[in-house]
Amino acid sequence: MKLVTKSVTNRLARTLLASSMALSCSAHALVTSGQITDVFDSQTFSFGDGTNMVTGYWSINTNHKGYFYGSPNQVAFAAGISHISQLTDASSFAFTNTYVGPLCDAACAPNGVGDFVLWRNADGYYGALRIDQIYHDGFSGPTTATLSGTWWFQSDGTPALAVPEPGQYALWLSGLGMLGCLALRRRRLVKVSTAA
C-alpha cells in the first residue's frame, strides 16, 4: 500500500511540475515593459532589456496623429491589435525600413485603446509600443508635439510579445503550492514508514 501511494504521489508530482513548467514557459517571463513619456517630435527613443534594444523615432502629422520610422530598425503597424495579449507573433506583420502612419493616440481610437507599433532590430529582437498619447496644440511648431506610450520588449528574441493574463499566474502558483503540499506529505509518509 505504501509503495502504491508513493508511486501515485510521485506521478502526480511529476504531472504538476510539468504543467507548471509549461505555464511558466508560456508566461513569456522574458517580456519586459515600461513607459516613454513626452518624447518630442523627431527625437529618437529606445527601449529593451538593457542589452538588446529597439530604436525608433516619430513625427507629427496632425494634432493627434504621427508617423513612426524604422530607421535604423524595421517598423510595422500592428493592425487589428487592441491589447498586448493579442501579440503572439509579431513577425506576422508587414515590416518596413521606412515608416508607418499616420497613427492615432488613444483619443481617436474607436475602442479607447491606442494603436500598436512594432519594431524589429537588426538582430531580430521585437518590441511593441502602444500609443497612449500624441499631443500637439495645433498652433506651435511641430517640435512641440509629444508622444507618450507603453512599451513591451521580448528579451529571448522570439516574436511573442503577449503578456499572460493574471489567471495564468494564479494557476501556475497554485500548481507550485500543490507541489509543496505533496512534498510535505511525502516527507511525513517517509517518517511514518521509518518509525514502523
Image (spheres, grey):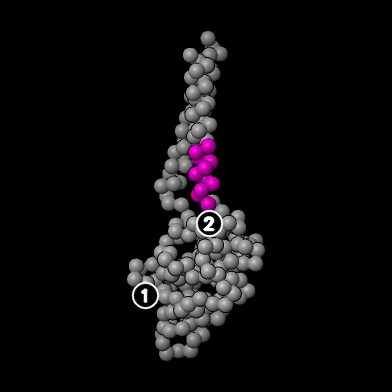
**Residue 161 visible somewhere in the drawing:** no
**Rendered image: mark on residue 160:** 2
Magenta highlight on residue 125: no
Residue shown at 53% from the left, 9% from the top? 196
Residue 51 picture location, percent across and down = 65, 61
Where does the image place residue 107, in percent across and percent down from the top left? 36, 74
Q: Residue furthest top?
A: 196
N-terminal of the two: label 1 or label 2?
A: 1
Q: Does the segment drawn in magenta span residue 22?
A: yes
Instruction: Quickly name the residue at label 1.
Output: 108
Task: Indicate the secondary structure of the residue bearing disc 1.
Answer: helix
The residue sitting at 54% across, 77% down in the picture is 99
Q: Report crowding for label 1: few under 14, some 14 to 19, many 20 or more residues within 10 A (C-alpha).
A: some
**CB atoms at circles 1 and 2 under 8 Å apart?**
no
C-alpha span from label 1 to label 2: 27 Å
Is residue 51 placed above or below 40 in the rendered structure? Answer: above
Q: Which region is colored magenta?
A: 18-28
